[in-house]
């Protein structure tokens, strides 16, 4: 199934449940309403913005359209910005009101004269009278003229004994607009989405809500240069999608991308939306969406983390999803769709597209958590995917995450394929740069290696917890490095610079050039401990640890370590360091790991 077909199907199901706008209508932000009387006179201007937040925001209302505009002048029906509705725009230099320059208000009035010519609805007739008599010179006398400038405006009719009635909500207005849609486009072709011969959309509605894309909206489907057309077809005719299907898929996608949507997550530069389909069982679909959201982006609330952790563990252990989430009746028949979008100039780029069952996706998410699992666990709340990406970014800032890595990582998790090579490379580079060998970074290294092992790209298994019998040289070198660091800390208790600060990068990449030096330093530190009667026992324990590690070396220090072996070095270091500090409280241990 194509992306557009899946979105069209989602829209139809939501519309059937009364959760989607009717064809030709959409929810748009309306800030002010001009209140008219039956004679078309302005009685008031009302602020209809949403004031529940810190700042007033346009209130969402279901209105006709919107029309598709680029540089052309094309008005909306029964609502629009003050430039179209009242003929006044905000001067970009001064911020003051100035007359519209391209005939926007005239186009607005002309559209309504055409569509409302035969109406006998008293509210719509009052609007026609208003448009005939309105002059932009009167704008400054309106209430809220300063705040309203440039905002979207609709119309109300004063109602006796009740609140004003929005004209775009009137039955007459909706019927006129719906009838006009079929007449806008006489060209009928086979729609690539529905397979029916219907009026073809020349331009598709804009998609809003994708991080980094134009705030006015962007397109997934568009053709505006001859180089992109074929067989003499222009714009929408080059890949015909009907007006109804274009409205349906864009309405569905805009709803999924809305600010208050629970079906949207952001991973790097990729905005990801998801939805489920369960025939005749919307509760199963809703439950599947809730479960996916929790597994991909676990909440950080400490009280919720315990329950979420149990859920993730159950999925990672391979328990059936219908047991983990009883509301999902049949995971094998509940279809699930995941779409990753990223900005690309005026268009949107599809980073990835996945269609599967929630059972299949749940299984692969369980594999992801199992691959990532390391002991001791370095987190209170399992890390979301975006949290993993931050470990590859300079200064841990989201804007420094590779633009491609977010989509690649998400796709690898959902498809069960190898993690992107750049994930392991990026984490290793950050550790060499900042010296922060944290538990989360060790878990990422372990996940990359464990998945490669499971998929047949690595021959050796990866320890989940400290394995003193592990013979891998890189793993043992990591353990050895942790012991040397602890030995230095015990011998020189107020040292400002540790061997990790000085030698981690070269020790993990070219051990033969560094470890002989570290061995000599260790001999000196052991001698220092033996001189202090209170710390002789420390020296003995360190000698035992060193002997145990060295016993597993079959050859000398290797001259170099590849990327995978550097990852094993990190895992060995993390396991050994955690063992050395396991007597401390959990809080101190976590802090030590993040130092």
Image (cartoon, rainbow, N blue to C red):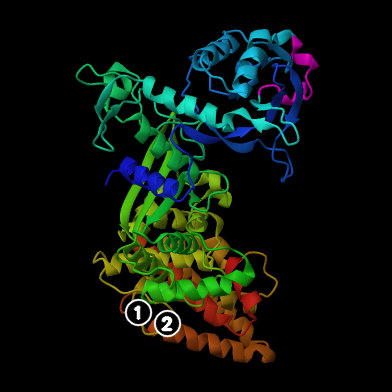
Residue 188 position (above or below residue 572): above
Q: Nearer the viewer, residue 233 or 422?
A: 233
Residue 329 position (above or below residue 276): below
Q: Residue at x 39, y 49 (%)?
A: 13
Question: Is residue 485 visible to the viewer in this orientation of the structure?
Answer: no
Spot occupied by residue 579 in the image (x, y as percentages of width and height):
53, 82
Magenta residues, start to end: 138-150
Q: Nearer the viewer, residue 197 or 43?
A: 43
Q: Residue at x 44, y 81 (%)?
A: 466
Spot occupied by residue 493 in the image (x, y as percentages of width and height):
68, 75
Residue tagged by mark 1?
553
Label 2 – label 1 distance at C-alpha = 7 Å
Displayed quadrant of residue 453: bottom left
**Majority secondary structure in the magenta region:** helix
Numbered circles on residues, count: 2
Is label 1 in a helix, a strand or a loop? loop
Indicate the quadrant containing the C terminus: top left, top right, bottom left or bottom right: bottom right
Residue tagged by mark 2?
549
Q: Looking at the image, do the residues carrying marks 2 and 1 touch, with CB atoms under 8 Å apart? A: yes
Q: Answer whether residue 522 is magenta in the image.
A: no
- Mark 2 surroundings: few (<14), some (14-19) or many (≥20) residues within 10 A: many
- Mark 1 surroundings: few (<14), some (14-19) or many (≥20) residues within 10 A: some
Spot occupied by residue 425 in the image (x, y as percentages of width and height):
40, 54
Q: Residue furthest left?
A: 231
Residue 359 position (above or below residue 233): below
């Amino acid at each position: 199934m194509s992306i557009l077909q899946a979105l069209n199907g989602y829209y139809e199901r939501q519309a059937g449940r009364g959760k989607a706008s009717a064809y030709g209508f959409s929810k748009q932000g309306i800030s002010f309403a001009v209140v008219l009387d039956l004679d078309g006179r302005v009685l008031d201007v009302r602020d209809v913005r949403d004031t529940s937040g810190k700042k007033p925001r346009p209130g969402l209302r279901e209105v006709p359209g919107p029309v598709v505009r680029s540089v052309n002048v094309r008005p909306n029906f029964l609502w629009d910005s003050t430039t179209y509705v009242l003929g006044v725009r905000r001067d970009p230099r001064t911020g003051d009101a100035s007359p519209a320059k391209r005939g926007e208000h005239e186009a607005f009035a002309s559209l309504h004269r055409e569509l409302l010519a035969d109406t006998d609805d008293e509210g719509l007739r009052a609007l026609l009278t208003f448009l005939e008599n309105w002059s932009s010179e009167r704008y400054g006398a309106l209430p809220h003229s300063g705040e309203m400038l440039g905002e979207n405006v609709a119309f109300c009719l004063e109602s006796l004994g009740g609140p004003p009635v929005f004209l775009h909500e009137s039955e007459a207005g909706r019927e006129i607009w719906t009838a006009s849609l079929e007449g806008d486009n006489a060209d009928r072709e086979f729609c690539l989405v529905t397979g029916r011969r219907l009026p073809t959309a020349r331009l598709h509605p804009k998609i809003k809500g994708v991080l980094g894309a134009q705030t006015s909206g962007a397109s997934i489907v568009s053709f505006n240069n001859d180089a992109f057309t074929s067989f003499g077809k222009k714009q929408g005719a080059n890949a015909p999608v009907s007006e109804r299907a274009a409205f349906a898929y864009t309405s569905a996608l805009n709803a999924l991308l809305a600010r208050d949507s629970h079906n949207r997550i952001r991973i790097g530069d990729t905005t990801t939306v998801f939805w489920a389909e369960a025939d005749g069982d919307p509760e199963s679909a809703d439950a599947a969406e809730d479960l996916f959201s929790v597994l991909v982006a676990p909440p950080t609330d400490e009280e919720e983390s315990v329950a979420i952790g149990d859920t993730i563990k159950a999925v990672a252990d391979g328990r059936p999803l219908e047991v983990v989430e009883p509301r999902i009746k049949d995971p094998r028949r509940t279809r699930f769709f995941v779409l990753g979008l990223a900005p690309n100039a005026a268009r949107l780029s599809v980073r990835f597209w996945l269609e599967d069952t929630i059972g299949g996706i749940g299984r692969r998410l369980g594999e992801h958590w199992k691959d990532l699992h390391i002991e001791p666990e370095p987190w209170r709340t399992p890390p979301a995917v975006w949290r993993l990406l931050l470990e590859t970014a300079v200064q841990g800032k989201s804007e420094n995450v590779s633009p491609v890595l977010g989509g690649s990582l998400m796709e690898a998790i959902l498809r069960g394929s190898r993690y992107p090579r750049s994930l392991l490379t990026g984490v290793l580079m950050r550790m060499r740069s900042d010296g922060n060998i944290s538990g989360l970074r060790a878990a990422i290294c372990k996940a990359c290696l464990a998945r490669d092992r499971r998929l047949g790209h690595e021959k050796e298994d990866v320890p989940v917890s400290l394995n003193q019998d592990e013979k891998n040289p890189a793993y043992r070198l990591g353990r050895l490095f942790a012991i040397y660091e602890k030995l230095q800390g015990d011998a020189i208790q107020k040292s400002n610079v540790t061997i990790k600060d000085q030698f981690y990068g070269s020790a993990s990449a070219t051990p033969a050039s560094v470890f002989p030096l570290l061995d000599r330093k260790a001999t000196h530190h052991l001698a220092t401990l033996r001189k202090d009667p209170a710390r002789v026992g420390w020296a003995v324990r360190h000698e035992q640890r060193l002997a145990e590690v060295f016993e597993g070396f079959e050859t000398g220090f290797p001259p170099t370590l590849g990327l995978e072996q550097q990852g094993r070095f990190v895992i060995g270091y993390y396991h050994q360091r955690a063992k050395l500090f396991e007597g401390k409280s959990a809080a101190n241990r976590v802090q030590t790991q993040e130092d």
